Image (cartoon, helix red, strand yellow):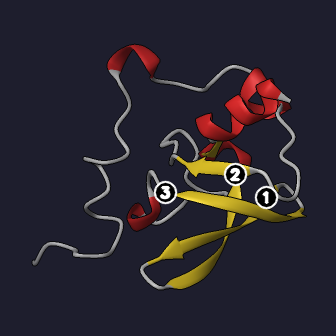
Amino acid sequence: MTKHHGYRSKTRRIFRKNVRKRGLPGLSKFMIDYKVGDKIDIIGDPSFQKRGFPHRRFHGKTGVVFEERGRCYGVHVKDGNKMKTMFLGREHLRLNKGAQLDKAKK
């Protein structure tokens, strides 16, 4: 029988956690409320696969939140010359560090 070559078969290398950080994150990760217009980084968390898991192409990309839809957030991400629309769970997002510095200065 041949090996399965689906698009998620090669994700183990990218979405691997450090051995000391395995398991579920703390509650502070879920207490963050992203607002429309926030710049965020897409970092896929392998502890949560079912809700809004990003494709490996978008791991490490920066996008802008444009809406909140249920438990997920709508994000615009630039992919080459196109703007892609993605719906991602909050456990796969984090605030962009440049955006955090701008908020701290204001």
Q: Is residue 98 left or right of residue 8?
A: right
Give residue 71's quadrant in the image.
Answer: bottom right
| Residue annotated with mark 2 | 39
Identify the amino acid type marked 1. Cys
Identify the amino acid type marked 2. Lys
| Residue annotated with mark 1 | 72
The answer to which of marks 1 and 3 sits earlier in the sequence is 3
> Is 83 placed above or below 67 here?
below
Q: Is residue 17 left or right of residue 72?
A: left
> Which quadrant, please, contains the N terminus?
bottom left
Tell me, yes or no, whether the two marked residues, 1 and 3, touch with CB atoms within 8 Å: no
Give residue 18's quadrant in the image.
Answer: top left
Identified at 62% across, 60% down, the residue is: 63
Between 57 and 8, the one lying in front of the other is 57
Identify the amino acid type marked 3. Lys
Tell me how far mark 2 sits from mark 3, CA to CA. Answer: 11 Å
> Is 5 placed above or below 23 here?
below
Q: Residues within 10 Å of mark 1 (few under 14, many from 20)?
A: some
The reply to whether residue 66 is in sight is: yes
x, y (%) of residue 23?
Answer: 52, 24
